[in-house]
Amino acid sequence: MSPGNSSGVSFGEALRVWLKIGCLGFGGPAGQIALMHRVLVDEKKWVEESRYLHALNFCMLLPGPEAQKLATYVGWLLHGVRGGLAAGILFVLPGALVMLAVSLLYVLGRGVPVVEGALFGIKAAVLVIVVEALIRIGRRSLKTKTLVGLSGLAFVGIFFLDLPFPLIVAAAAAVGYFVTQSSPALLGLKSGEEQSAVSMPGRWRQAGAAAVIGLVLWWAPVALAALMLGANHVLVDVGLFFSKLAVVSFGGAYALLSYMAQQAVETYGWMTAPEMVDGLGLAETLPGPLIKVTQFVGFLGAYRGAEPFSPLTAGVLGSILATWVTFVPPMLLIFAGAPFVEQLRSNRRLSGALAAITAAVVGVILNLTVWFVLHVLFAQVVEMRAGPLRWYAFDPLTLDLKAAALALVAATLAFRFHRGLIEMVAIMAALGIAVRLLLTPI
């Protein structure tokens, strides 16, 4: 099957299927990839099993949400560029619209006991969700002692040395790339010759056109905000910050959350740490890629730096801009890189770089886990520094016993009774409301 050629699938039917997937895409990347496999491979039989898995491997090599990139790539296979655009946009749009509505309700519902209670319970669920992600990705990724060591170094680097996340990703990629040349087994890769792959005609021309058009679309709204509002406006900060995140977002949303949370809370002052946890909890319960939590951060950041707009108008603009610069770059990379998919898939050094990056991501997610636990369970958490070292000091006497009890309930639901994500979040939200209404003094 050649990209964009007749695949026996009408474009109208594909649009309906992509919209359905976008509306039902709950459960994070694992659930979304499984949903697409069931619909596209098992039910519709639009893509062969082997090609679907090859596409997934390719998408894992690139930054950005894996499920959205996979949808874009399959759409490109079926109907060319228009198919990729339709698949990528419809995969994100339903969840983005719901997230925008929830963000509006979040700021308008502050102080309402039911809303506050639901968010309190969801925070406990978020802790367990992050721990689950850490365990799941660690089991899958840390296959050798070398990869475990890279994960540990990444944790030390980001938690104790406050190294930038992009630097950690770049260093891990370099280690993986060069180690693969001499000792691929250290990274869990098999030795052997690289297989040659068939080249797609016109691939350089298509990649060049995609890169030029994509870069213009990506940066146009950021440039417009800078021209109209000044380089120091919050919307420009939102556009630049999330553009930077988009190109280093290897390993999925959890890898970025720690860096994003610390920057949004401590550097830009867009939100508090508990609000960051609220955003992740909301993103977990809505359809679409988990990385749409960037939309919530962009909304709150612009809402609180609204001039010359009203707070709600600024929040909506910030939400739209954050979504745009988060999801346009991955689609650009798919359109530019898709013609080279076979060559990328067969390149063993790139596979080694990806394995090392994924190991480093485990260390970054461990950092995120510790950061969330401290800020959810303790009322007083202070960042401390001594020379190049950074750590978080907390007062054990400020432990929130209600939050700890809810976290224990969430852990029991997840690890003992194996309840699903949506069910667990719903139960914890209900328990949070009960705690807030029954146990909080009026």
Image (tube, helix red, strand yellow):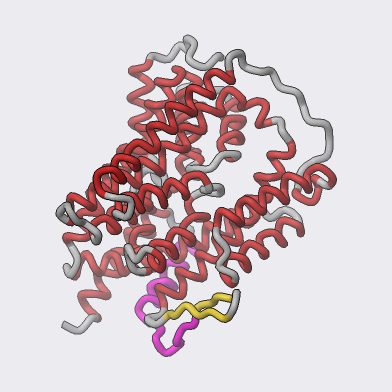
- Comparing 6 with 248, the one in front is 248
Tell me which residue sits at (45%, 33%) in the image.
331
Q: Does the magenta stretch include residue 395?
A: yes
x, y (%) of residue 54? Answer: 61, 30
Q: Is residue 74 visible?
A: yes
Which residues, given as a range, are shown in magenta?
A: 393-417
- Comparing 291 with 51, the one in front is 291
Q: Which of the image's four quarters has the C terminus?
A: bottom left
Q: Please give left or right for residue 337 compared with residue 349 in the image.
A: left
Note whether 71 is above or below 367 in the view shown.
above
x, y (%) of residue 44? Answer: 46, 22
- Comparing 189 with 349, the one in front is 349
Tell me which residue sits at (56%, 29%) in the image.
337
Q: Main secondary structure of the magenta part?
A: helix
Question: Quarter-wise, where is residue 84 in the image?
Answer: top left
Note whether 395 is above or below 30 in the view shown.
below
Question: Quarter-wise, where is residue 305 in the image?
Answer: bottom left
Tell me which residue sits at (55%, 60%) in the image.
164
